[in-house]
Structures are given as structure tokens and as C-alpha cells.
Image (cartoon, helix red, strand yellow):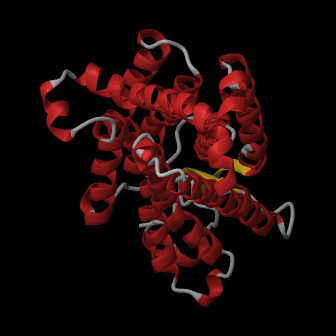
Amino acid sequence: MDTSDDYDYQDYDYRDALNDSAQEENPFQHKTTCTKEVLCVFVLVVSVFIFLLGFFGNALVIWISGFKMKKTVNTTWYLSLAISDFVFCASLPFSITNMVMEEWVFGRFMCKFISSVMFLNMFSSIFLLVVISIDRCVSVVFPVWAQNHRTVNKASVVVCISWFLAATLSLPSLIFRDVGSHLGRTLCYNNYTSSQYSHKIIAVTRFFTGFVVPFIIIIICYSIISLRLRNNRMTKSAKPLKVMSALVAAFFVCWLPYHVFVLLELNHEHFDQTILIYGLKVSTFMAAANSFLNPVLYVFMGNDFKRKFKNSVLSKMENAMGEEGRTTSRYLSRSSSMDGRASTHI
């Protein structure tokens, strides 16, 4: 079995190294073996679960934050995050079909588009998390200024800029993703043959712009927030940060393995190819899992655990997102009266 292209987000092509035996048996007729392999079946089941929970969960978040709740800066952030995850989950059936058939049957355009959607989701999610972190930091350090200048219109502009940058950084998939025939089947793969250093440049760029730099910015913001809240002895006001902290932690836990294996892949000749192949399979589905975790975190991080089981699903999700706006508002109001005194502690 050619395991290198079961997941179409992989950056390197191991086909020539792994298909010698398969070519000797039958070079022109391919038979899928995914349903006979434990790992493939496991990834398939998990992918279907991610699709179902992520698709309907994020659709619910979009409906609540977009139509059921008052439009605020906070709901603008979370609505954009939910849209990003929803679009990615909606594209998963194409990848699931490709995994089962072990062949790409949707043409060159969809090959490029589906891969681009994954990286659009990755970049838009992390950029929005950075924006939210900076917004929280400014609200805590400069509460009066934030209360006067944080508006929905400005938040919408920032969201549009974030999406534009994410779309720009997703362009390599549109450029290098291609469709080709191998061993009697059609594959969707990355064709880096036009430039010797394209693969390395793209992998390193994605790692720094989509992981390292955002991580540093978020850590700095949360360090400032923690210091300010501790100095002001207002630790209760940190409760709304639980949702945001969980979202950030989930993103980095889900995406770190993927970036690690992509970087290892740059020097694939020094590592066991089977480990890299299966490592990329597992890390890719872990990255996809981030898209369904967000609506789950909205539910379980909002209010007291016992009350969540007494309320309806809609009430739980609305409370999870709405609580942050209410508590932050109370904090800003309280901080306004303490601003002169608190500034001496910075």
C-alpha cells in the first residue's frame, strides 16, 4: 500500500521509495486497503467524528453568536473563529473520501482548494487568537482607553485584515498543489520540483508565522495580564480568561506535532520514512481536531459545571461566550475608578 498520500496535506512525496514492491505485483491496478489497516480505520473514524462534531458544533456557535447574542467585540472574535473552523470541517468529506479510496477523484481545482482551506483555517485561527490576546491585554492595562475605543466596527476591520493575511499565506497550496497519476491511480500532492528550495521555505515560513511568532506574542500578552491582575489583587476578574487560555492551549497542542513532523520531513533522509509517514498522518488528524474543540470549550469553560447540565445546550454556549463580555465590562468599570492608584504598581 502507498501510505504517503492517504492524507493529502502531506508536504513530501515518498511514493518512489515505498512502492517498489507494489509495482512488481501490479503497477496499473490499484485496490484500496484502508479498511484493512488498523491505523487507517482509526484515523477514518476519528475524521468522521471530527467532521460531525465540528460541522454542527461550529454551526451552532455561528448561529448563537451571529443571531442570538448582542453583537459585541467579543462575539465578533468568536464568530470569526467559528466560521474558520466551520469552513474547514465542511471540507473534510473530500479528505475522508480520498483516504478511503486512496485516490483523488475531485480534480485539480479541488486538490488545490481543499489543501488551501486547511492552512487558511490554521493561519486565521492563530491570527485571531493573537488579536484576542492583544485585545485582552489592552483592556486590562488601559481599561479607560479600551472602554472608549473598543468598537464592533474596528473589530470587524481587524478580523478582515487577519483573514486577508491568512489567505495570503495559504497561497502556496494553490501554487504547488497538483494532481498526477501513479501506479494506476490519481493523486493530489505537493509538486515542489519547479524550485529547489520551495519546500523548505514554505515549511519554515509556516512554522514561524503560524506558530513561533504568535506563541511569543500570546505569552507576552498573558504575562502582562497576569502581572496586572495580581498587582491589582483582582484575580477573580481573571475567570473570563479561562475560555481564551483553553482555546490557545488547544491550538498549540493540536498543531505542534504537525509542525514538528513537517520540519523533520525537510531532512527525511536522516529519519525512518515509515515513522515520518505515520507521524504526519496522526499529527494531521490532531490538527484537524482543533476545529471541533473550540465549540466544546465554549460549553464547558463558561459557567459552573453543575449548572451546565441543568441548562439547555444553547444556554450553555451563550453563557460561555457572554460571560466574558459581562465580566470584562465589570472589570473595565471597576478599573476605571482605580486607574490612578493601580498605575503605581506597574
Give me the residue at 35% from left, 47% from top. Answer: 47
Number of disc labels: 0
Q: Closer to the camera, 96 or 85?
A: 85
Observer able to see residue 3: yes
Q: Where is residue 314 in the image (x, y as percent from the top left)?
A: 28, 20
Query: Among all residues in the image, which is located at the extreme front?
Result: 341
Q: Quadrant of residue 124?
A: top right
Query: Among all residues in the image, which is located at the extreme right?
Result: 195
Q: In this view, does 172 lie above or below 283?
A: above
Observer able to see residue 135: no
Horizontally, residue 205 falls left or right of residue 285, namely right
Please identify the quadrant where the N terminus is shown: bottom left
Horizontally, residue 304 falls left or right of residue 160, namely left
Q: Is residue 16 above or below residue 176?
A: below
Please identify the quadrant where the C terminus is shown: bottom right
Q: Is residue 144 above or below residue 231?
A: above
Q: Closer to the camera, 10 or 34?
A: 10
Q: Position of residue 55 (x, y in %)?
A: 39, 30
Q: Closer to the camera, 106 or 42?
A: 42
Q: Is residue 290 above or below residue 66?
A: below
Q: Position of residue 239 (x, y in %)?
A: 40, 44
Horizontally, residue 65 falls left or right of residue 49, namely right
Give me the residue at 71% from left, 22% from top. Answer: 148
Q: Quadrant of residue 52?
A: top left
Q: In which quarter of the image is residue 333?
A: top right
Give me the residue at 40% from left, 17% from top. Answer: 64
Query: Among all residues in the image, which is located at the extreme bottom?
Result: 270
Q: Closer to the camera, 165 or 237?
A: 237
Q: Where is residue 73 in the image (x, y as percent from the top left)?
A: 59, 24
